[in-house]
Image (cartoon, rainbow, N blue to C red):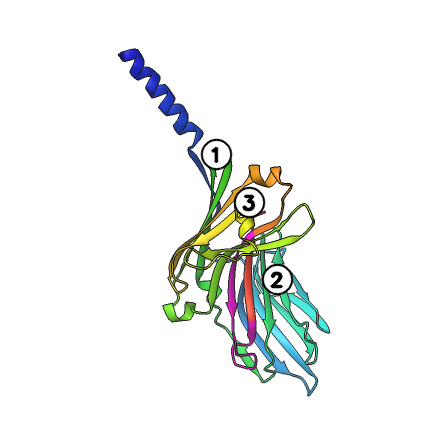
Amino acid sequence: MALKWFYVAIVTWTLSANYSCIAEIVRMPQQPSIQMLGLTVKPLNESFSAYVLVFLGPSDTEVEFNGDTLEVTKVDVDEFKALMVNNNDNMDRRITLKSKSKGETISMYPNFNYNLLTKTSFIENTCYVQIEKDEMGERTKYTATVSSFADREDLENLSKYFIAYIRDKSGAIVQLTTRHLNDTENEHVVSYYKYLDTYYSGSKTDSYNEYYAILNYPAIEADGITVQSFGFVLYVSSSDYYGNDMTINRSWYYQIV
């Protein structure tokens, strides 16, 4: 009898070991390393406007702007000021801040209000994002935990989600983003969930929520799928293109793959 129980114990331990999760903290709970502190628009004349952006960021933070002028100066150890001049007719006015060392990218699209305005409040700065990686046998699960100290109503325009671009054998690129478990599945991408499924179950305005993404690497390799990129996003949108918010949209992206 003792030998029988010893055998059962060995089998049970072996099965448990094979299916145990090995957790790894990919990103500790913290606010974005790149943070916008202030954005001001100054009308220069009827045709041109100047944007002044003050931001925090690592020393390797790069600024990209498709306007007429870009000048970046260092204000403090981790504080910078960017001066950008743009023709008001230029629709390609996106501003991008990128740090390779932190794997972070901020992108924003200024709106069409050229009056003298300043914005100093950015909801994404209130978010603490933690990302955990669990090896579950042949699958890898990522969990993003997001908490914010902002008021609930201020979170209405903030979306949080995993995003991935995968390429199949034909060369087609498919975008997958986190879906709510109660949403109707997108028939155009549902077949790709066998490779990467990402979902959440809470409310958009919750001050604390968890988001999940599961990658099935054996299926990815077997079907010749390539994960082009994979990361987590905080996205802010505004429907008032000429309002005082000053940006039509902003996004913070953390690169995982």
Q: Nearer the viewer, residue 19 or 76?
A: 19
Q: Nearer the viewer, residue 212 or 185?
A: 185
Label 2 residue SS: strand
Whether label 2 touches label 1, CB < 8 Å: no
Query: Magenta stretch?
Result: 231-248
Q: Is residue 65 above or below residue 17?
A: below
| Residue at image location 42% in from the left, 33% down from the top | 20
Q: Is residue 92 above or below residue 161?
A: below
Q: CA distance from mark 1 to mark 3?
A: 15 Å
- Residue 111, given in percent of the width and then of the height, sits at 59, 77
Is label 3 or label 2 in front? Answer: 3
- Residue 80, given in percent of the width and then of the height, sits at 60, 65
Q: Is residue 28 above or below residue 120?
A: above
**What residue is pinned by disc 1?**
137
**What residue is pinned by disc 3?**
195
Q: Residues within 10 Å of mark 1 (few under 14, many from 20)?
A: few
**What residue is pinned by disc 2?**
97
Q: CA distance from mark 3 to mark 2?
A: 31 Å
Q: Nearer the viewer, residue 44 or 88?
A: 88
Which disc number belongs to residue 64? Answer: none
Q: Is residue 138 above or below residue 53?
A: above
Label 1 residue SS: loop
| Residue at image location 65% in from the left, 53% down from the top | 173
| Residue at image location 33% in from the left, 20% down from the top | 9
Residue lying at the far right of the rendered structure: 68
Is label 1 or label 3 in front? Answer: 3
- Pointer 3 or 2: first along the chain: 2
